[in-house]
Amino acid sequence: MLDVETALSRALARAGLASAKAADAVAVAARTARFDVADIGAKAALTGNPIPRLVELLAAAAPEGAEALHVGATSQDIIDTAMMLLAKRAAPVLLADLAKAADAAASLAERHRASLMAGRTLLQQALPITFGLKAATWLVALDEARARLSEVARTRLCVQLGGAAGTLASLGDRGAEVAFLLAEELGLVVPVLPWHTMRLPIVELSAALAGAASVLGKIARDITLLAQSEIAEVREATSPGRGGSSTLPHKRNPVAAVAILGCTRRVPGLLSTLVSASEQEHERAAGAWHAEWETFADLLRLVGSAAALCQDLLGGLEVDVARLRANLDASGELPLSEHLTTLLSPALGRLAAHALVEEAAQRASYSGRPLLEALLSEPKAAAAVSGAGVAPEKLRAALDPASYLGSTATFIDRALTAHRQREVPS
Amino acid sequence: MLDVETALSRALARAGLASAKAADAVAVAARTARFDVADIGAKAALTGNPIPRLVELLAAAAPEGAEALHVGATSQDIIDTAMMLLAKRAAPVLLADLAKAADAAASLAERHRASLMAGRTLLQQALPITFGLKAATWLVALDEARARLSEVARTRLCVQLGGAAGTLASLGDRGAEVAFLLAEELGLVVPVLPWHTMRLPIVELSAALAGAASVLGKIARDITLLAQSEIAEVREATSPGRGGSSTLPHKRNPVAAVAILGCTRRVPGLLSTLVSASEQEHERAAGAWHAEWETFADLLRLVGSAAALCQDLLGGLEVDVARLRANLDASGELPLSEHLTTLLSPALGRLAAHALVEEAAQRASYSGRPLLEALLSEPKAAAAVSGAGVAPEKLRAALDPASYLGSTATFIDRALTAHRQREVPS
Amino acid sequence: MLDVETALSRALARAGLASAKAADAVAVAARTARFDVADIGAKAALTGNPIPRLVELLAAAAPEGAEALHVGATSQDIIDTAMMLLAKRAAPVLLADLAKAADAAASLAERHRASLMAGRTLLQQALPITFGLKAATWLVALDEARARLSEVARTRLCVQLGGAAGTLASLGDRGAEVAFLLAEELGLVVPVLPWHTMRLPIVELSAALAGAASVLGKIARDITLLAQSEIAEVREATSPGRGGSSTLPHKRNPVAAVAILGCTRRVPGLLSTLVSASEQEHERAAGAWHAEWETFADLLRLVGSAAALCQDLLGGLEVDVARLRANLDASGELPLSEHLTTLLSPALGRLAAHALVEEAAQRASYSGRPLLEALLSEPKAAAAVSGAGVAPEKLRAALDPASYLGSTATFIDRALTAHRQREVPS
Amino acid sequence: MLDVETALSRALARAGLASAKAADAVAVAARTARFDVADIGAKAALTGNPIPRLVELLAAAAPEGAEALHVGATSQDIIDTAMMLLAKRAAPVLLADLAKAADAAASLAERHRASLMAGRTLLQQALPITFGLKAATWLVALDEARARLSEVARTRLCVQLGGAAGTLASLGDRGAEVAFLLAEELGLVVPVLPWHTMRLPIVELSAALAGAASVLGKIARDITLLAQSEIAEVREATSPGRGGSSTLPHKRNPVAAVAILGCTRRVPGLLSTLVSASEQEHERAAGAWHAEWETFADLLRLVGSAAALCQDLLGGLEVDVARLRANLDASGELPLSEHLTTLLSPALGRLAAHALVEEAAQRASYSGRPLLEALLSEPKAAAAVSGAGVAPEKLRAALDPASYLGSTATFIDRALTAHRQREVPS
């Protein structure tokens, strides 16, 4: 808020509405005076926001700055512009962390392009995929989330300067010019109109942050699931003291992934508060605006934390390739059942082939026998298969997971190419 | 958290599982040692919560306390119990503020039992009511909200002690006893089972807080609307510096009501986060639990602030009785249109009477003439009225708002009686 | 809505404000007339709600009912009371399903009282628990959720009758009596005051529904995790066609648990809408009230569905006891590490013992050797253990999971006793 | 869903993976067969979604279509693509309604460029503005919301085709090609990768819809406030039967504005559900995906309804210019107090001038005298004013609201220019 008051005093001076000396006095006071935050808080309860008291204190600290202090502005101008400034300072850090996370995901996609593992739907093993494909999916989403965030940061971080009712009346016919100069001072965008009660910039920025959170949360969720004791396909990088438990000496907790989820799980509620609060009355809202302050700051902080944790997490993620494969193999050919169906469908029809293999899969599940054996050991099924004219060797070969990856390689290439081509300005 | 560790050490000593001396050492260290919060925060990022480091520091500060320190507990036990302790300390303050707000509403209901004003539906004047009835409605809701909150505070502020997985294994067969003693030390309730991943106590407490917020928000909304410049039926008590604007010298803003809404508008989002977070995995949640910490504290703080503001607001509310009546009268008998319908219905039928008066009301609106005149000056309508056999004096008398208040007095009495009979333990 | 209009006409007749014949005419028309829903919908867009058209159609269908039709009521009275009636009809079904789910959980708790399994925190194996304890935790939460829901259903399903502005003006001094009789007709509670813009009954009912959803979601989440291919500790009951996949012949999806989560995941958002919407202006809200209609009905439907699915799911849940134990054993004594610490703590101090076992656990993890062997094969550690004076046999015995269950049996007994003692009126 | 199956069969045929005849058979069956929705619903409860049964029925209706039916797809592919198709069909209607609303706002901004009214902050009169400026603010926000929605509709309506685990394995190396053709058939975008559990397209689309809702809600809120009986500055267009009340013959309710709010108030909760649900496990989510279906459809429906209502509302809005001015004048020069401060500041200093005028404003409020008179009739204040050297005529002139509009005209021009230059593809 002090930076906004300072920038405003400079803008006024540049517009010739105050002396450079007065502007300097404000700047010095803002930089050097000691403000009693508790006092400002107590006074804020009387006036509804901290600005009147802050301006009073600034005026006292810079008596020669009066003509350049807060002229033209209302409290909301200072607070809204300060919120945007906060976002402007957070954005490059956040975008850099998302970029690092994306690079780490790209490296995982490349490295594990062919690392076979189980694809899982509804938490059940479904089909073989590769770890590279999973990482490529993370990558694309990270890239898309930061592209949107970068765009919003570039186009929607708007200065707010409207004066008491959005007309900038106290600046006569110079209001628009001062607003332009203020934006320039702070590196913010000049909006078409003051947006005191039209909160789309807040809503769009919050939505872009929520988009990033949604991606970070998905990645963290996958990692907590892959890191389960019984699955153990990935592990967070270890460092002394990390992931320990106050009671359980043997534990190696996925602390970064858990901390990410601890952040991202709060985002939908905060976003809904901000969207709700965007229904603002007339020229200043009675309550809805005030509900934005901490909520928006919390949102920035939480998504920023989640991004920082995620780039660290992905950068150091340990993938146990042997375990990926062992878990897939433990399902005894079942994840290849669709491949058998695919081979049998042309001759038997898709639904009949599906029914045949489904029954064999159930026999396999209950008996613990491999799928193909369960299929061929049942006389009727064996007859159907033989009638279909598919050679047993072909069926056997179909049980190699590497033979049933479809477009996996294509998709990984696409994700990596898109990542390389994307230049997201941080 | 220090108070919980201290209470646990006492409980262990009372159970004979540690010496009184060790427990005292923990208590002294918790009370007197200086803890470096930034250091605890930094270490919390490694282990996922602040307890391991806090216990380490306590151990260093109280070497003779080891046998009584954190024995049996896991990090979650300390944090969850601390959350409940927070709520336990907030509850009486909050309940007292709600009680004061209710008393103030009762006093308004009594005093303005007969202060005629417009009842408004969809923000349009509808029928006469009295300000006392409006205050009685606030009163009943305040009483109901605090009754529920008081009940939840009495029955659902549960100690949490389960150890690493809810079995209290490290306390052998003494776990349940220690949990009982810990609850006794802290004045908390003993739950049927540890509730580490069954978060109904949090959900019910949060819902009761949200219920209070919903009432406080409704009252504040009414007051911001009644305080509008053009309506001006109520005003917040003034005190030096209160309600001023940084730019507009003439303004007298409804700052308390606005501040209440600034709090209550954040509650639905926080509540949704806490309900979402109650879907917790197995014996400790990977993220959902962590999302509760700040959210729950925010909820307590915001509802507490809103209640404090509201008791002050209602206690000093200035009601302009003349203005209440003037606004009602300004609608030129229109809010009594239903009364005319009611008188005409027996003879004409309800729908026909409604149509007759609706047309007269439209003529009255457009011409600015009073309703009855607009009705009787239209020949067909006049004929219908005269055919209905209702004497003009009776129609005229029906236009006195005081004659058309229905059960208003009964309702105010009921609300006041209920308030007097209700003994809500704070 | 037709049932409310019918009940109102009866209440008017019982109060002597309309003839029994007129009330009968309304009742017959409400029961037998055919209403064109599309027409009512189209007209609702003009008046803001469906009641004016519905009343018009009822009037046309029951010309002799006029004196008993909609007298005293406003549209909101009919819609609000209809919402409560909806809840009243849903409640017993929902409570019965929750009771069945609780009985099924009790039966699982009893049956699997001693079925050893891994307790899991942050999705990592932590300590041994029993499946019975897990089921007992579900049980307690189900019982608590239905207790609250039952209480709310008993005390907060309130009739709404206030007339246009909450005064019941058009009923003269008979309003409160008619409201009482209407409540009696419908089996609803008489509130202290009309609650047209004081929505605590809606908020409390919704919160109780959300409480139930939170429990159902937790149970479903546990089951989807336990049913994972690699864990396979539980399975939903099978029936022909259930849990199949359109593409994967081998899959046996946990469809009921997934469907429960598909319902419960929508509850926090719906609840936040209803709490938000409770800030209602003056004597009828301009929009917030309208936002409640579908939202509340959705909430009832979704929680009802989740409860129905859950009782079926728990009633047929297949628990693979051997697999529970095998998964626990696969962690090679690690979940008993705390037990070793506990034994070594008296001599070595809790933190030193923790560090010793933590290092051993890490060696065990990396080498694949059992924990105790990893502990004793390291000379310094072995020396420390031997210095602590704990006999190796005692350490070995400590690795039996059944020896380290703490209060498990006590807790299960408590949950079952509480369940038996609880008489929740459905 | 039938359209997606049909398009998929055509894509397969175009890729040479099925005969044109088979594809035609699927298309004919999808168009002509009668499906028993209740039966599909009942079966969906067994398999977790409606597709398996739908495909079964299609297969039965089109036996010759088997080779072209559902080949390569999993249930989620059909449902996700159908959701996108729904959005694709809704988007042009929604965008056209937003465009009409923007045009209507532009016309109001133009027409009421100089219609003086009170700007209101915290629901108190603050400064003069013009109705044109208010409409210009609506205009800019409508334009920005539809620009974003249009962009999302153009770039993020993605086809989903990934097969059981996102690899399109059953289509061998032809998967990406079939996905491309499917997108072409339906006019949808080809995503970089299948997005089965990376829900950014849903999140971004939902956020854009919420952005539109936030603007529509703000406009509707302003209108309900301006339409209040006591303010009466605007009125919705009347048509027979519109805005009436079932009980109050005189009422002319702002039904469209209220209906808009009834829609938009539900949006934050729905959005939070969709963002929450975007944390999806592995290759298909266990519940979160299912939570999206109705929620997303509700969101489309509600925002679409609100837009349709808003264009109608703004198109017919009646603005009472005389009343705008009368309400402003009724505040007895108080909204010009800042103008006096501005004139006195250069000589007296901003804070001293503010204090001087603030005291005068309070005297004016309490005495009912006009502001300038209250200022000059107090001797000390009069002396200060006279000392400041501002001529009384200048002060008097400053009380003309038209003299204190600052950048109002500039801002209106900017908004209109931006509107004209914007070409938003519908």
Image (cartoon, coloured by chain):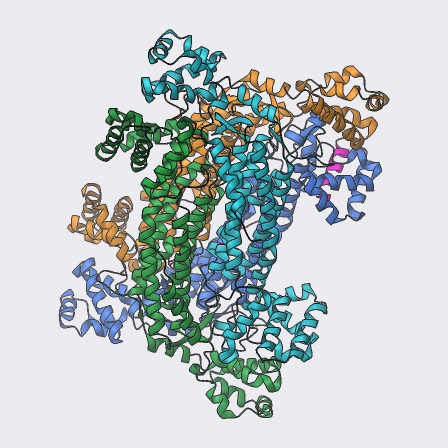
Chain colours: A blue, B cyan, C green, D orange
Residue C26 lies in quadrant: top left
Residue D408 lies in quadrant: top right
Where residue A36 appears, as percent x and y from the top left, is 76, 49
Image quadrant in which the N terminus of chain C is located: top left
Image quadrant in which the C terminus of chain C is located: bottom left
Instruction: Return the residue nearer the eye: D356 or A56.
Output: D356
For the point 29% across and 67% down, the residue is A336
Specify start and end residues of the magenta stretch as a single range.
A1-19
Instruction: Return the residue nearer the eye: D201 or A197.
Output: A197
For the point 41% across and 21% down, the residue is D249
Whether residue D329 is visible to the viewer of this picture, yes or no, is: yes
Q: B341 above or below D46?
A: above
Whether residue D177 is visible to the viewer of this picture, yes or no, is: no
Q: Is residue C383 magenta?
A: no
Q: D263 above or below D109?
A: below
The answer to whether residue A400 is left or right of residue A37 is left
Where residue C193 appears, as percent x and y from the top left, is 46, 38
Instruction: Return the residue nearer the eye: B340 or C85.
Output: B340
How would you classify the magenta stretch by its main secondary structure? helix
For the point 63% across and 39% down, the residue is B315
Where residue B154 appears, as percent x and y from the top left, is 53, 58
The answer to whether residue D154 is left or right of residue A167 is left
